[in-house]
Amino acid sequence: MLQWMLCAAAIMLFSNETPAASAQSDAKESLDRYLDVVYATVEQGDQSRELKLDIFIPRNAKKPVPVVVWIHGGAWMVGDKRPCASLFMTEHGFAAASIGYRLYPEAIFPAQIHDCKAAIRFLRANAEKYGIDPNAIGVWGASAGGHLAAMLGVSAGNEQADGTLGDYTNVSTRVQAVCSWFGPMDFFTMPLGRRQFQADRDPETLLLGGRLSEKQDLARLVSPISHVSKDDPPFLFMHGNRDTTVPLQQSRLMHEMLTAAGVPSELIVLKGEGHGFRDNQAAAQKVLQFFKRQLQDKPKDKIATEE
């Protein structure tokens, strides 16, 4: 658990180190900030729970603008939508958003992907209101967030993954580009019982609500590698070769599967890095260039509803 906690802390530090974040006080007047926007409500016993996201729109950019949605990590157990790691992209012609989603033990899978899907539907359905291009939605996440970003990329139209949460269930959950930082891709090949976790307390077991041997159908649903198809959006993977929490092989397997299916995919291996990157600004620039190519420079297909 410790390494996952450290990863969450590293991502928060990363967000604060980005060029835009260091100058947030100067940039405030150039952004429209919509904080704690309710994108869906879930019923929990006798109570309702509001799910929220943050949206950041550059005022001076030519509308509509592509948006990069940040999904935080933290073993599906910890973390928060703030700070938003993609906020620095608002200085480069993008909108940014950050999703808050249900964590363990509040909920097990597939609640997490249902929440993220509902957030994408909300953004697309309200694109005109916020000045967002509904045909240029990118997602970026780290660790557990990298897993959820990959799931968004490969599972559009899958009823079990899409769920029925929120007010816009007829709106597409398809995204146009995905960046995953060191996220689990195949639960069947993830090393369980890793030394940093207590027995049967590894994040994957907790997320599934039981051992993989007892939850094989759910493990298949939760694994992005199970959903790869030729119409998936372009992917960028970044992973350290010394990651002992989520092995590099996870990103490598997914990259190879996508490539075999004819999907544009790039894998950047950061030598000497573990579960998190020390030179976050350099890594962020690679992410920025990826989304520029995929969301700003390429012609876009119109997305409305699932077929």
Image: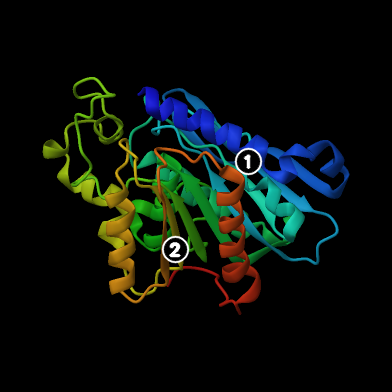
Residue position for label 2: 235
- On the image, which quarter does residue 303 sit in? bottom right
Q: Amino acid at mark 2?
A: Phe
Image quadrant occupied by the C terminus: bottom left
Q: Estimate how packed mark 2 is, as few (under 14), some (14 to 19) or many (20 or more) residues with alpha carbons within 10 Å.
A: many
Camera-side residue: 14 or 53? 14
Task: Give percent across and percent down for residue 247.
Answer: 29, 44
Q: Taking 225 as reference, is 283 left or right?
A: right
Q: Amino acid at mark 1?
A: Cys
The residue lying at 73 percent from left, 53 percent from top is: 90
Task: Give percent across and percent down for residue 45.
Answer: 41, 24
Q: Estimate how packed mark 1 is, as few (under 14), some (14 to 19) or many (20 or more) residues with alpha carbons within 10 Å.
A: many
Give the vertical position of 215 relative to 60 (above or below). Answer: above
Label 1 secondary element: loop
The residue lying at 78 percent from left, 66 percent from top is: 63
Q: Taking 257 as reference, is 290 left or right?
A: right
User: Mark 2 or mark 1, which has the lower sequence index?
Assistant: 1
Label 2 secondary element: strand
How many numbered badges does the structure rendering display?
2
Give the vertical position of 211 relative to 259 (above or below). Answer: above
Camera-side residue: 208 or 256? 256
Give the vertical position of 24 relative to 91 (above or below). Answer: above
Is any part of residue 188 visible from this angle?
yes
Is any part of residue 185 visible from this angle?
no
The residue lying at 61 percent from left, 58 percent from top is: 288
Residue position for label 1: 84
Task: Give percent across and percent down for residue 9.
Answer: 52, 28
- On the image, which quarter does residue 19 sit in? top right
Image quadrant occupied by the N terminus: top left
Give the vertical position of 28 relative to 299 (above or below). Answer: above
Q: Taking 239 as reference, is 122 left or right?
A: right
